[in-house]
Amino acid sequence: MRHSRREICAGLLAGTIVLGCLIAAARTPVRADAETEAVACVAPENLARLRLPLKRTARQLASHKLTIIAALGSSSTAGVGASSPEAAYPSRLMVELGQRFPTEPLMVLNRGVSGARAVDMVAGLDEIVAADHPDLVLWQLGTNAVLRGYEHARSDAVIREGIEKIKAIGADAVLIDPQYAPKVIEHPQIEDMIGLISSAAAQEKVDVFHRFALMRYWHERAGMPFEAFLSPDGLHMNDWAHSCLATALADAIAGVAAPDRARGNESSRLDNAAGESTVGERR
């Protein structure tokens, strides 16, 4: 069941939707594996920031009206690998943003569908995302295309079509590229997909949150074994990774939508050291 912005706002005023969800998520314990329970969430500043302004999101936050973020994606967004829906990155992102904007009403809607490809998500954008009236769409994409095989030109066209549809509904857009995981990096096409997403985003003037580079930093620079941030399937993020991704993403969003609120979660402070890992770096 979808809610219009008016219905969501009405629920907010009644205290039954956003604040209730936010408090419930904040109080829900997130499982910590033995390898990561004592490991701080680390992300170099250059990997935990966006470079383009989120104009609509910034205006909505400044207006003190309900800010709606739609998280579009496949199994990573749906929460596969997390111990519960509350541990998946969209739920954790709502908590993190709530800590940075404690007086602003906001909601993160999880629109992830396991197994979905970019072409599937684009086909459902009008019905699913537009019905939510989002101010910001976070679009996680690329992994299933790499795992199943894809045509470069066709994927480029699909990504651009998706970005155009998001812009058409008046929302800001941030793309999230694939995860750095054994079952992903064993495919030679992964480097092409990372470059394709970045290139399409640059030409369409939207931003990319470089999840691939961030997770590679955890493994190659921070020295974390894959088992510390991935589920046993060697593909999906575990609770720690979902939580750390949400922390970094919240910092990135706040950094361009309201710079004075960036890095607002003192309990999950990220490492400011500049990382050497970049999107184009080869393994």
Image: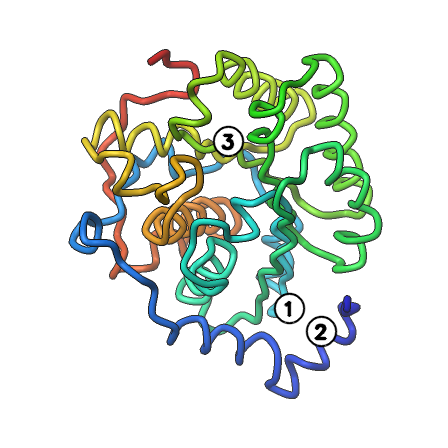
Looking at the rendered structure, the kind of residue marked 3 is Pro
Task: Please report contact status of discs 3 and 2: CB closer than 8 Å, yes or no.
Answer: no
Of residues 59 and 98, the one drawn nearer to the viewer in this rendering: 98
Q: State the residue position of label 3.
A: 178
Residue 139 lies, in percent from the top left, at 62, 41
Secondary element at tag 1: loop
Disc 2 residue type?
Ile
- Mark 1 touches mark 2? (CB < 8 Å): yes
Question: CB under 8 Å between callouts 3 and 1?
Answer: no
Q: Work out which quarter of the rendered image holds the N terminus and state it.
A: bottom right
Disc 1 to disc 2, how far (Cα)? 8 Å
Give the farthest residue toward the left.
Answer: 38
Q: Measured along the vertical axis of the image, is residue 199 above or below residue 264?
A: above
Image location of residue 259, percent across then percent down: 44, 50
What quarter of the picture does the C terminus occupy?
top left
User: Going from the N terminus, do you reach mark 1 or mark 2 first?
Assistant: 2
Circle 3: element type: loop
Residue 43 in the image: above or below residue 192? below
Circle 2 — which element?
Answer: helix
